Amino acid sequence: MATVTNWIDHLNKPADQVAGAIYPGAGSSEGLLVILAIIIWVGWHVLTSKSESDELERLARKRHGPNDHKSNITDW
Amino acid sequence: MTDQLTALTTIFTEFYYWVTVVLMFLIHVGFCMYEVGASRYKHHQHTLMKNTMLIPLVTVTWFLFGWWIYWAFPTGPGIAPSIMNESTALITDDSLFSAKFQVATSSIMAINLGDHINGVFWAAFLLFSWTAASIVSGAIIERITTFAFGILAIAIGSVFWTIDAAWGWHFDGWMLKILGYHDAYASGVIHAIAGGFALGVLMVLGPRIGKFSSSGEPRNIGPRNPWLVTIGLFLIYTGFWGFYAACNIPIFDLGPEYGMEGISYWTATNIYVTPTTLSGITFNFLMSLSGGLLAGYWIAKGDPFWTYSSGLAGIICASAGNDLYHPIQSMIIGMIGVVISYKLHYWVERKFKIDDAVGAVAVHGYAGFIGLVICGFVLNGYPSSGYSVGAMWDGTTYAAINPLGMFIGAIIMFVVLGLIPGYIIAKVLHGMGKLRIPREVEIAGLDYEIMETAKSDEKAVASATR
């Protein structure tokens, strides 16, 4: 995965090769990383949406009044 | 300086570090706001004073001996020879970067027209020291004496973190050579060590009264003021930009530095004097922050306190390799670090009855440790330095970054230089009866008398007619 294994050797290369990407997997892993990012992005929305819906439904079932929250204000 | 280009490069570098110091000051402002927001009303002013007084305590000791330690200890001493003088002794000879010049009596530890860098570089490192001490400060609020915290702040801020910086951050550090250690933006050098130190202190200090029920179930205490916590953490994020910038050299010619004849290569470098770009680390900073926030929001089910803290933990986890990672790698590493740290926090709390009031051990210690371990795998094979590349354990050359070396490095940071010293110093302070405030004062509140006086003053003023 390492694109550089020796900085002196790397900087001795022709200028166009020195001034390039140096992250792990440069030139071979970008597509996979983007696919992973999209999966995480979609997965996060699915998971948090479900979690939020469950929480809201649970709260709705309790049928609290408009002023009930005032008795829950803390005074640490 | 007699030519314009040298003057421009030098003054730019001087100004660059000066600005990073100003930005990093916001980290301390953020920590003060965050701690006051997390503590209860009856402890506010003492909590604030405790964290404020670390500024002079650490600054003066950093001037007297902390900075000297950084320049003297890269060899261990006795572990790996310096590339400057080939000796394994403390670096106190006439070498260019010797600790000999970093003592309080040295002429470059003052205004000196022949030196434009030492003061701003000293200050940048000093602000790292404040951060290390502030990380510990948050974990132990509402029950430690200010005296004990002062001793602990000096120990972590001016001694132990500076030893680890000499070993794992200095361009001549033995951990780079023997282990292939790499920690560009201080996952371990600041965060793992401070988190480990805080855990060691907490093991001796014990929980706040009321934190655990008689059956051992943990209870949530606070935060008193979520808004202060929010603004405090945003300020810490902001100051973290300055921290990242301060870990770089903004402009440097690596050709002559690496002994390459006829080659000139101007670039920004990381702390190890290897190339990176400010542009690239900006991608990674923001993507790891985002990864941390996404994971924190999900794992903590939208809890604001943990979501904000997770943004910080995401950056901290990716920091070791954020000079080289791809932005998506940074994001994923930040997410992994947050999930593990969050789970570990609650497991340790329940299992060992550790009361870490602000989650500092998790956000800084566990996330930093995990970040170092992950870095060993993702950056496996990259050189830890530009000066040479050699085998692990050799010591005369620099080992490449590798998983085993990074794991050992993480243990050194979190346990050897963090947890063990924190535990021992806290034990000594406890033995002297100086560690914890009296039970009665903790129940009444550290600010009881201040509040009582203020109340009687208020009554007197309210009833006054002239």
Image (cartoon, helix red, strand yellow):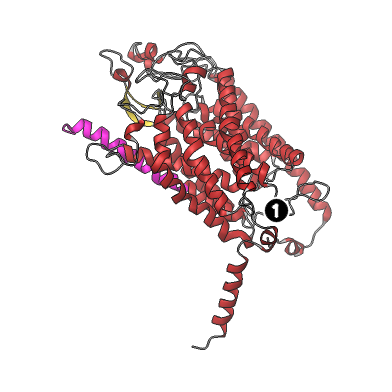
Q: Is B225 left, or right, of A49 in this rendering?
A: left
- Element under label 1? loop
Query: Residue B348 location, x and y as percent?
Result: 72, 38
Image position of A64 with respect to A2: above or below: below
Magenta-drawn segment: B1-26
Q: Is residue B8 magenta?
A: yes
Image position of B118 with respect to B76: above or below: below
Q: Is residue A4 magenta?
A: no
The subunit carrying tag 1 is: B
Query: Residue B214 location, x and y as percent?
Result: 82, 50
Query: Residue A69 location, x and y as percent?
Result: 74, 61
Q: Is A25 left, or right, of B219 in this rendering?
A: left
Near-viewer residue (B37 or A44): B37
Q: Main secondary structure of the magenta part?
A: helix
User: Label 1 neighbourhood size at 10 Å, few (<14), some (14-19), many (20+)?
Assistant: some
Which residue extends farthest front? B432
* Count of number-bearing discs: 1
Q: Is B171 left, or right, of B13 in this rendering?
A: right
Identify the residue under disc 1: B221
Which residue extends farthest left? B2
